[in-house]
Amino acid sequence: MYLNQKDGWIEVICGPMFAGKTEELLRRVKRLEYAKKNIVVFKPLIDDRYSDNEVVSHNNNRTKSVNITETIQIFDYIDSKTDVVVIDEIQFLDEEAVLICEYLASQGIRVIVSGLDKDFRGEPFSFMPDLLAMAEYVTKLTAICVLCGKPATRTQRIVNGKPARYIDPIVLIGAEESYEARCRSCHKVYRKPKPYKNRIKNK
């Protein structure tokens, strides 16, 4: 059960690529549109995979959005009548996103965001752990592992047909041509450190 609308809160939709995060985000936006709420949707300018001025899911559902390069720019597009602030692919913004989401929620605004909780290495993505800790509601989605069909919680980056290297840049915008959904067992990162390798003894 959600809190009273006037209280404000933060909802985070997270998981790997191809888990349906944006699809779930758009589903919530549609419901709020039916409820006649004043909604402003944002996305990072860097995410131009499908559209320049729309949030678009892999299933091609979409809604108009405002492109921003810094989270602080949100204040240029909202006012006292704004009920809901929505941000897709929030992990591509700056760390101030956590403080701003907190502030908006404290002002009675419902904040709904989606993003990757892990990077291609399988490690926490930037400020996402802090945002997850501050949120009232967290929806963690899974995809389907392309290799074994098990629930996928990780994003596999592919470079020239092989797993990416641990030292490769964290941010690389792409879709099916560069990434796959993988489970823990099938997820591989070339030369990722393994500090506890062989610590469990065979009996």
Image (cartoon, rainbow, N blue to C red):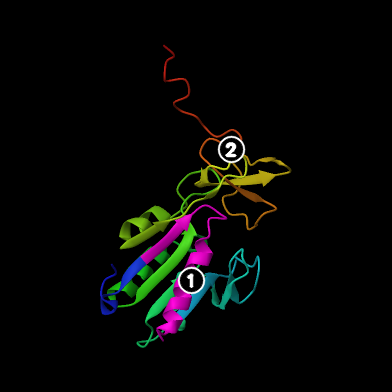
Question: Decide: marks 2, 1 in contact (CB < 8 A)?
Answer: no
What distance separates the C-alpha of mark 2 from that of mark 1? 33 Å
Q: Where is residue 122 in the image (x, y as percent from the top left)?
A: 50, 43
Total marks in image: 2
Q: Nearer the viewer, residue 115 or 61?
A: 61
Residue shown at 53%/55% (left/top)?
19
Q: Which residue is drawn at 32% across and 56% down?
A: 133
What residue is at 65 percent from the left and 57 percent from the top? 175
Q: Is residue 134 visible?
A: yes
Residue position for label 2: 189
Picture coordinates of residue 14, whole percent (x, y): 45, 57
Q: What range is drawn magenta here?
A: 11-38
Residue occupying image coordinates x 35% and y 87%: 80
In the image, residue 37 sits, relative to residue 121, either above or below, namely below
- Is 94 a magenta residue? no
- Where residue 188 sits: x, y (%)? 58, 37
Report whether 40 appears left or right of 167: left
Does 27 appear in magenta?
yes
Foreground mark, 2 or 1, reads 1
